[in-house]
Amino acid sequence: MNAKPNETVIANARIVLADRVIEQGWIALASGKIAEIGEGKAPAGAEDAGGDLVTPGLIELHTDHLEAHYVPRPKVFWDPIAAVISYDGQLATSGITTVLDSLRVWREDGAEEVDGRAGILAKAITAARDDNLLRADHFLHLRCEIPMPSVVEEAKELIDRPDIRLMSLMDHTPGQRQFRDEVKLRDYYRGKGAGMTDAQLDELFAKRFAYQQAYAANNMREIVALAHEYRIPLASHDDTTDENVADAVRDRVAVAEFPTTMEAARGLKDAGIDILMGAPNVVRGGSHSGNIAAVDLAREGLLDILSSDYIPSSLLMAALQLPVVAPAIDLPSAIRTVTKAPAEAVGLSDRGEIAVGKRADLIRVHVAGNVPVVRSVWREGRRVA
């Protein structure tokens, strides 16, 4: 048997299916989809994968890493389309074939970062996509900081875009959720750019408290209603208490991003909400904010989805580490946290697993010690890296 014309065949691969691993198998790709999967000897003319892993392309729901390309230094704004292309290349070579670009949709007086520039970046993503400059498939994730005065207005300016797949409900008011420990929050702000003095932080925190009191309750109602009206899945963020969990259930969120306590994670899981944690948390062995470790949730069966957050390469690294640090998780289960589970959470049912008829979004991975190397990337059957 020979490979058919206009068909790509990848052979001699460890193929990670949704529920098992084919130790020596082959995959045929045709017309952008997976046409056939086999074990043992492949058709003649196949590409030899050298025994490497072949998995579905990774799916990323929450990364704000684009911001680092757009504002590479404080007060330095790069060409937005060039920033998108650079960021996209890093995603692809990290094995990410589908990404939800997380954009801040609020403005803050005096901020000189990416606040208030979601529209600029969204237009740049569209322009790069329309000109066929992107390797990964890009959608949008609107990060809504609920206490901010302009968050509803900003969200409404973007809400009718067809590429929005997720909206998150965030509240970073000092003393709660991610930054219950005010000392850690002060350390975080001091480490950004040139840093801030205690007097400046006192002023900032006072403003944040005032914003929460004045705007949070009404903004929450409006953002939730907007998401439901446009049928966009919602994510909660940094759930910590039983009250936070109850709010998530009330708002019908689909995904809980980065819960900070075991108690909150258990409550979310009991409510049938998918739990997303940071891949850097797994790789580093803990949270940079001092909250619950993702590995502890994995060991308790409370981890559904991983996100690279701020380091694209961490997504694959963390997935491959999960079976080591949480032995009850086998390789197919670990790979599902970065493929099938995130796809299903945002309604992308055409991808996320190696199965006949699914999109031919695949990566070939060589593992050297503890470091995975992405050797090849296919998106809809076309090699993009």
Image: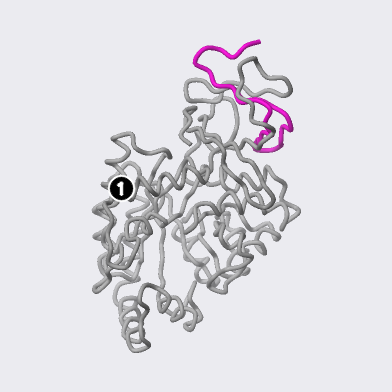
Q: Nearer the viewer, residue 93 or 118?
A: 93
Badge 1 density bin: few <14, some 14–19, many ≥20, Cα 10 Å = some
Residue at the (25%, 52%) spot, across then down: 120
Protein image colouring: one colour
Magenta segment main secondary structure = strand
x then y, percent, for residue 56 = 57, 37
- For label 1, the residue is 82
Residue at the (46%, 34%) spot, across then down: 384
Q: Name which quarter of the figure residue 16 lies in.
A: top right
Q: Check residue 58 for magenta coloring.
A: no
Residue type at numbered disc 1: Ala
Q: Check residue 6 for magenta coloring.
A: yes
x then y, percent, for residue 311 = 49, 57
Residue at the (48%, 30%) spot, across then down: 383
x then y, percent, for residue 304 = 60, 52
Q: Which residues are magenta?
A: 1-27
In the image, taking residue 58 as reference, residue 99 lies left or right, namely: left
Residue at the (30%, 62%) spot, across then down: 114
